[in-house]
Image (spheres, grey):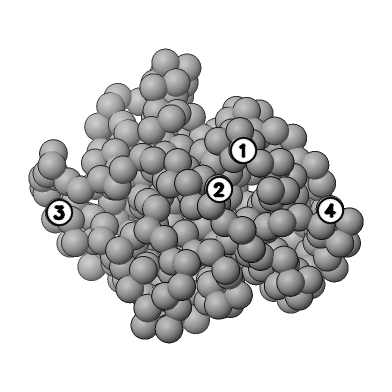
Amino acid sequence: MKVVSVVGARPQFIKLSALSSRLRKYHKEIIVHTGQHYDEELSALFFKELKIPKPDYDLEVGSGSQAEQTGKMLIKLEQVLEFEKPDLVLVYGDTNSTLAGALAASKLQIPLAHIEAGMRSYTDMPEEVNRKVTDHLSQILFCPTHQSVKNLRKEGITKRVYLVGDLMYEALICNLQTAQKKSDILKKLNLNSKNFYLATIHRAENTDYRDNLVKITKILESLDRKTIFPVHPRTRKYLEERHLWNRLKKTRNLLLLDPIRYLDMLVLEQNASLILTDSGGVQREAYFLKTPCLILRETTEWIEITKTNGFMTSSLDIKKVQRNLKRLNSSRISKKQATTNSSASRKILNILNKFNG
Ligand code: UD1
Ligand code: UDP
């Protein structure tokens, strides 16, 4: 088949890296980068470090409001798909790039496959709209968890739904040893293993509302250990606009960094004594690496994770956060904790190889 893979944001590049080489053994792949993420440290560095083939198209859409960004992508994707006439379009996750890829393919009646189908938070976050619409337009739905299969069933989607596991896990397994060998991040930052926290924040619900961003700031100021905080550009923008950036910069225990490379991130995640995050990918990596994790959201799509000792969601109420941190710091993570298997790409390919429209 000729397959167009549509990606645009950091976590999608990582998942693409776990599938692309296997896909290319059997099919012709065209990579379309929407340009949703364009800073070198959010985009080009991932292609380089993970040896992902250079995108065939860079749509250079850039940032904008939800509709503006999605609309621009849609117009440009339609032109690419009309020209390339692929047999299948492959989209990942739940970003605006996912939604635009799904809409463009469906309107041209090109079969659509969704990786990470069926995830639901049952909230009104923008990603939930993207996921739902994409799932309802897809002909093939690759689910990462049992819960995601159940979620689809509740919405009446049962045809061509496949439980394949998590490409994020596969990427981690493929890159962890290299990361341990190559990354000098612990030395560079003068960190001792299990003696620091790692934090990432970028969800709109946490960054775009002043009250919540102030709460996040207070949480970061209150931490009892050195904390490494690679700051997503969205978060930095709002922290600066709201005059919180300089305040955080002055916080003694806190080290603000630009977004870091994937291999460095894996090493920090593995060596942190605890992770605070609202990221979908980072909470899963924490789980896979058995590093306790406080998910700074009321809910998560990855509910399996929070059923395990050492992992919990939390509101931004500072007293609750402190209580939860105390609990997590004294929790024991079972060595036998469930892991998904690391053959998602193989399963996806077995299914795609049999697909005939
Ligand atoms: C997007 C996804 C989110 C995903 C995240 C991964 C949507 C609705 N959101 O959020 O689901 O978890 O990517 O990181 O698709 N910016 C830069 N440089 C860049 C990219 C963005 O400075 O290269 C800044 C711009 O000010 C922009 C803001 O970050 O307005 C937000 O970027 P955007 O792509 O709209 O959403 P993310 O927050 O990155
Ligand atoms: N990540 C990274 N550098 C960073 C922050 C995150 O390489 O500075 C990686 C992280 O290890 C994970 C992915 O980016 O693999 C998660 O992406 P993000 O948090 O942006 O999005 P989400 O998963 O929430 O959609």
Residue depth check, mark 3 versus mark 1: number of the one nearer the observer: 1
- Judge the density around disc 4: few (<14), some (14-19), many (≥20) Cα neighbours within 10 Å: few
**Circle 2 residue:** 353
- Judge the density around disc 3: few (<14), some (14-19), many (≥20) Cα neighbours within 10 Å: some
How many callouts does the rendering have? Answer: 4
Identify the residue shown where x is 72% and y is 48%: 2
Taking the view exactly as shown, the residue that stands out farthest to the top is: 181
Identify the residue shown where x is 38% and y is 33%: 173
Identify the residue shown where x is 37% and y is 51%: 165
The residue type indicated by label 4 comes to: Glu
**Circle 4 residue:** 84
**Circle 1 residue:** 26
**Circle 3 residue:** 309
- Judge the density around disc 2: few (<14), some (14-19), many (≥20) Cα neighbours within 10 Å: few
The residue type indicated by label 2 comes to: Asn
Q: Nearer the viewer, residue 21 or 94?
A: 21
Dot placed on the residue nearer the N-terminal end, 3 or 2? 3
Dot placed on the residue nearer the N-terminal end, 1 or 2? 1
Q: Which secondary structure lies at badge 2?
A: helix
Q: Which secondary structure lies at badge 3?
A: loop
Identify the residue shown where x is 61% and y is 33%: 25
As measured in the structure, the alpha-carbon distance from the residue carrying label 3 to the one carrying label 1 is 41 Å
As measured in the structure, the alpha-carbon distance from the residue carrying label 3 to the one carrying label 2 is 39 Å
Dot placed on the residue nearer the N-terminal end, 4 or 2? 4
As measured in the structure, the alpha-carbon distance from the residue carrying label 4 to the one carrying label 1 is 18 Å
